[in-house]
Each structure stands twice: as structure tokens, then as C-alpha cells.
Image: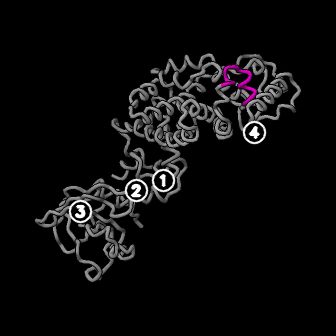
Amino acid sequence: MIKEKLLHHIWQFKKFNTLHLYTIEGEKIDIINVGIYNTNAGPDFLFAKIKIDSVEWNGNIEIHVRSSDWIKHKHDHNKSYKNVILHVVYEFDDKDYKIHNSSFPILELKTYISDEIKNNYTFLKENSFDFIPCEKLISNCLDSEFLNFSENLYLEKLKSKCEHIYQILKLKKNDWEATLGAVLAYTFGLKINAEAFEQIFLSIDYKIIRKISKNKFNMESLLFGVTHELNNYMDDYPQNLFNEYKFIQSKYNIPTQLIEIKYMRLRPFNFPSLRLSQLANLLSIYQNLFSYVIGIKTVQQYYQLLDDVKASLYWNDHYVFDKKTTKYFEKKLSISQKNLLILNAFLPIKFAYSQSIGNSLDEEIFEILYEIEHENNSIISNYKNLGIKCKSALDSQAFLYLYKNKCLKRQCLNCEIGFRILK
């Protein structure tokens, strides 16, 4: 059965035959303005303007699947609906409507909507799929002017990230430097350890981190001290970290805690041991990192900021404590790791800050994204197989957000691809 949300979409974008519309009483309807879509309580569309026969009406539009839903939803006793000028329904099924309410006309849409829209919507909402709901229909709407909506999608993603950033900012009492630290930690932790890394910076007063971050070893001892049982290792390095951590813990009255981190399902180069050391190094190099991030204008400047970030010497031939490897090399940030930090930490913080002070940095952020190579993963590959091109990180970031927040949730009516399919 057709859903009310689809009827909202059809009315809002006039995806039906509007040339010869008539009420169930045979009165001619001309739509001058469909109104403003209302996502709050009350009628579905506000401030609409229509003409019925020769009379112009201004007011609200209510939409239902069946005309009897008006009584079912008790709108006849709700004053919010007294200014309704048209009841739009998919199917007229209330033969006693005149008894219930005769103050406004009714438009039955069923015969004005094409079978293609109804069939495509049913397919998108109900059929099983291997990757995304529209995978068998998307080729019909790909053209040279298609897919110029990456910017809007990415802005939507940034705004959703801002919600979390502002929550952290509130916890940190409007300290942007502390907020950046938590966002960086989350990004360094990757999916497996993101929340655990973030918890380190949420649970410790950032004043302490400011004081000890001037010394890289002290910063490492703190990060490792709250995530590893350092006294269980034999090498001098973890033992020295343990001793320093106990001193810092006592000096700053840091509560005893052991935040659980995971090594499973991670490649050695992404082990939390290396990531913690690299994070400590970054914070020790830049005492006022937030100021650097806000002032940067180009992607090359971001790369330069991260060029010297690396894990401590101990990790040149280790991935975990007490297990030496045969290969010896610096564990510096790779280009993909740098891009990850730019995309998921620096740009969101920059955007959130600019929004908080009423500035718009959209174009500047887009220019940086255009310069970063798009990500390569299974999701982006699957989109490419459907004929969608990813030219830069702007596209890949947009489509990763689209996949997670719309495709998997079958939010096809909120997607430009779905919009085109349901034309």
C-alpha cells in the first residue's frame, strides 16, 4: 500500500498530473502554491494557495492515504486543522464525509499519479538488494548533469558531525583546544578504538594535558597509562612509561582507570599502540594546535603540519610491547592517514567553529576536498560499479555518508537519486 510520506513527496514536488484536477464534487482545482512542508505537529503543508473554480483560497493542506483517516486521527476535534483548505488523499473511502466535515473540499490523487512512480517506490521500499535499494534502477537517471549534489551531501554530513562536536564543546566548557583533542583522538582510534580513544580525553581534565604535552614522553605515558597495564611488560620502555604515569597520576590526582582498547581485526600499522604514540607526538609538537588548524587555508598546509608526526623510536621495530620485529623503520603518518585526519577531524572542527561565530567557510572547505584523492574502499567501489564517478574526497565523503544514512535506511525520498527515480 502507498505510504503517506510518498504522498507528501508527490504533493511537494507536484509529481502528478496537475493540469486537470477536480475535487470529488467535480470542482476545478488549480494549484498556485503547494505550501511549506511542515515537519512539526499540525497540517502537512502550511501557507498554501489554490483556486477552486474561480475562488482563491489561502491556508493549509492535510494529506492522508484514506479520507477516513481524518476522523481516525481525530483532526475534526483539533483546532490546529481549522484552516485546512484542501484535504488531499490517495483514496476516497469515507462515504459519510459530509456528516463528519464539509468545510473543505477533497482531492483524490489515485488517478493522477503514474503507475511508474508507485511501482518504483514499492520496489525501493520492499525489494531486497545486494548493495543499495536503487541498484537496479539507478542507470535510468544517470546523465551528464547528474550527481552535482556531493557538496550538499557533504554539508549535511558536516552538520551532523557538528552536533557531536558541540556536545564535546559543552562538556569541555567551550574549550576548543580540548574539543579538538577529543575529536583527534576519536579519529586516531579508527572505528575499532574511536570511542575508547575519545574517552581518554573526555575523562581527563585538559588542563593536565596542556601541562604535560610539552614533553612527548610524558604525553605518551598518560595515554598508555590509562589504556595498558604497563607493569606487565618486560622492556624498559613500557616500564619507564609506567613509572612516569604513576608520577603524573599522583601529581594531578588522576583517578585510576583502564580504558579498554582492541587490537583484533586491525593491521599492525593501525595498532592502537602506534596510533597513541603518534597522537602524543602531534600534541607535543603543537601546543596550540587549534589555532594552526583554524588558520590553515590549503591541503598542502595540512600535509606540512602532519609531516613530522611519527611514533616514538621504540616503535620503529615494534608494533606491540615486548615483541621486536625484524624490520626497522619510522612509523610516520601515511598519506591516507593524513587524509583521514583532515577529513574527519580538522575540517569538521574548522566548520563547527566557523558556524559558531557566524562565518561561512563552505567554499574554502570544498576547495580543500577537491585537492584530496577520493577514498578507496568496498562501498565506493560498489558505487563506481553502478556508474557513479568519484573525482575527489568530496565525492567519496558524500557517498559514504549517503550509504550509511540514507541507502541502508531506505531513505530514498531524501536522496536526489531517489528523487530522480520517482520522477
The image quadrant where one finds the N terminus is bottom left
Residue extending furthest right?
234
Is-magenta flag for residue 220? Answer: yes
Q: Which quadrant would residue 262 be assigned to in this image?
A: top right
Q: Earlier in the sequence, mark 4 or mark 1?
A: 4
Left or right: residue 288 compared with residue 350: right
Write down the residue under mark 1: 410
Q: Residue at x 34, y 76 (%)?
A: 77
Q: Which mark is residue 255?
A: 4
Q: Mark 1 is on which residue type?
A: Arg
Q: Nearer the viewer, residue 146 or 210?
A: 210
Q: Main secondary structure of the magenta part?
A: helix
Measure the C-alpha gap from mark 2 to mark 3. Answer: 32 Å
Q: Which mark is residue 59?
A: 3
Q: Which mark is residue 208?
A: none
| 1 vs 2, front mark | 1
Measure the C-alpha gap from mark 3 to mark 4. Answer: 61 Å
Give the number of callouts. Answer: 4
Q: Nearer the viewer, residue 286 or 146?
A: 286
Is-magenta flag for residue 380? Answer: no
Q: Position of residue 132 (x, y in %)?
A: 50, 48
Q: Mark 3 is on which residue type?
A: Gly
Measure the C-alpha gap from mark 1 to mark 3. Answer: 32 Å
Q: Earlier in the sequence, mark 2 or mark 3?
A: 3
Left or right: residue 327 compared with residue 35: right
Mark 3 element type = strand
Q: Residue at x 77, y 26 (%)?
A: 319
Q: Mark 2 is on which residue type?
A: Asn
Please state the extent of the stretch shown in magenta in the rendering. 211-222
Write down the residue under mark 2: 120
